[in-house]
Amino acid sequence: MTQRKAAARRIWLVAGEDSGDQLGAKLMRALRTMAPDTVFGGVGGEAMAEEGFTSLFPLDDVAVMGYLPVLARARTLLRRIRETAQAVARARPDVLVIIDSPGFTHAVAQRVRKAAPGIPIVDYVSPSVWAWRPWRAKGMRRFIDHVMALLPFEPEAHLRLGGPPCTYVGHPLIERFPELRPSDPELRRREAVPYSLVILPGSRRSEIERLMPVFGRALEHISRILAVEAVLPAVTRHRALIERLAGDWPVPVRVLTGEAPKYAAFRGARAALAASGTVTLELALAGVPMVVAYKVSRAEAFVARRLIQVPSIVLPNLILAANAMPEFVQADCTPEQLARALVPLLEGGAARDAQLSALTRIDGRMRLTGDDTPSRAAARIVLRAAAPPEGNLA
C-alpha cells in the first residue's frame, strides 16, 4: 500500500472532439499544479499536445458529427473505440477521465468497465439527459463512477433520473468573466443610438441557411421603428456564406470573426437575436438581453417533439428555472414575432428591465466558491477518484 501511494499517478484522458480537447488541456494544467508527478495517457488533440500529451492517434479520426459522417467513418470509429479501450485496460491507470463526446467516449468506457472493472471512470461533461433520452442517466451507472457537470442544475437531474453521482464543477465560461463583462464606456455604448444589435444565426451551415433570411426580415421590421447597428460575429469557415446571405439586408451588417471581436461586440451590445446554443450563455454572462430563435427540418422537429423533455431550449432559462428569455421555435420563428419581442428590449422599459434583472441572477447560480475555477474543481474530483496520497488538494 505504501509503495502504491508513493508512485506517480497515472491518469488517462479520452477526448472525442475539439471542445473536449480544450477541457482536457485545462484539466491537465490543474492536475499538474496539485499533483506534479502525474503521468498522462489517452486520446487528445492540439491543446492537450501543447501540455505535453501524446495521443494514441489523431483526434480527427474520431471527431465526427452528424449521422451521415458517422456512418461514413463507422469502421474507423469502431476500430478506434476498440483500440482505445484495449490500451486503457492494458495500462491500468489510476483513473480514466472521459471528456464529452458520449458517442465515442461512452463506448470506450463501457468496454473498459468490462475488461478492467477496477479502473475508476469519471465523465467530464454530462450528456443532456435532462433534455432528451433521460433513460441514459440510469444506464450510465453501469460504467461511470462520477459525472462532473458544467451546468448547475445537472446534479439534481442525475439524482432525479437515477444517474451516477454528479458534481457541478462550473462551466468553462465562468473563467472568462473579465472578457465578457462590459466596462463603463461599453455600458454607455449600450445606451447610444443607433443601438447595437448583435445577430447570431448559429455555427452550423444548416442553422445559418434557415435562420439568416428570417433574421434579415426581422431586422427590416425593427429598422422601421428604431435606428440600429447590426453586428454579426461569424464562424470563420462560414463567413462567405453569411456575407452572401446578408448582402440584401436593409440594414448594413458588420460581419466579424474571432473570439476577441465577438466578446467586444457582446460587451457593447444593447440586445441580441441569437440561435439557441452555448452562445446564449455567453450573452447572459455579458448581461445582454436577448431573443432566442431556432428552426430545424420537419423530420428533425418531428423527432424532437417526442424526445425533448425540457420547458425551454435556452440554457439561461434552464439555469434560472424560469422562461426569462423569450424563445421562438419552428412555426413561431417568424420575422414579425422576433421583431415584436426585440423592440422593447432595444427601446427600454419593463421588458428590458425584467430581463436584465434575471440576467444578474445567472452569476449566483454559476459561480463557484471563493476563487475556485472549473478546472481546479474538476481536478480535485479526479484525484479523489484516483485514490491520491494524503495531502492538501485544495
Image: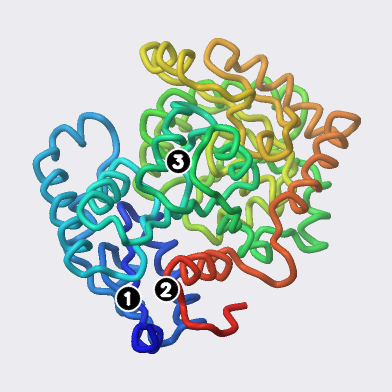
Residue 283 horizontal/vertical position (percent): 65, 46
Compare marks 1 and 2 and give the one earlier in the sequence: 1
Residue to which mark 2 is pinned? 28
The answer to which of 43 and 138 lies nearer the viewer is 138
Point out which mark residue 153 bears: none
Task: Specify few, some or many for label 3: CA neighbours under 10 Å numbering under 14, 14-19, or 20 or more.
Answer: many
Residue 362 horizontal/vertical position (percent): 74, 47
Q: Which amino acid, mark 3?
A: Pro
Task: Specify few, some or many for label 1: CA neighbours under 10 Å numbering under 14, 14-19, or 20 or more.
Answer: some
Compare marks 3 and 2 and give the one earlier in the sequence: 2
Residue to which mark 3 is pinned? 127
Task: Specify few, some or many for label 2: CA neighbours under 10 Å numbering under 14, 14-19, or 20 or more.
Answer: many
- Identity of the residue drawn at 59% across and 42% down: 154
In the picture shown, does residue 338 fall above or below 178?
above
Left or right: residue 222 compared with residue 7: right
Report which quarter residue 244 is drawn in. Answer: top left
Helix or strand or loop: what does disc 1 sit on? Answer: strand
Point out which mark residue 10 bears: 1
Q: Nearer the viewer, mark 1 or mark 3?
A: 1
Q: Which amino acid, mark 1?
A: Arg
User: Is the residue under label 2 in contact with that under label 1 (CB below 8 Å)?
Assistant: no
- Identity of the residue drawn at 68% across and 66% down: 178
In the picture shown, does residue 255 fall above or below 89?
above
The answer to which of 214 and 33 lies nearer the viewer is 33
Residue 9 horizontal/vertical position (percent): 36, 79
Determine the CA span between mark 1 and mark 3: 26 Å
The answer to which of 394 and 43 lies nearer the viewer is 394
Q: Residue furthest right?
A: 350
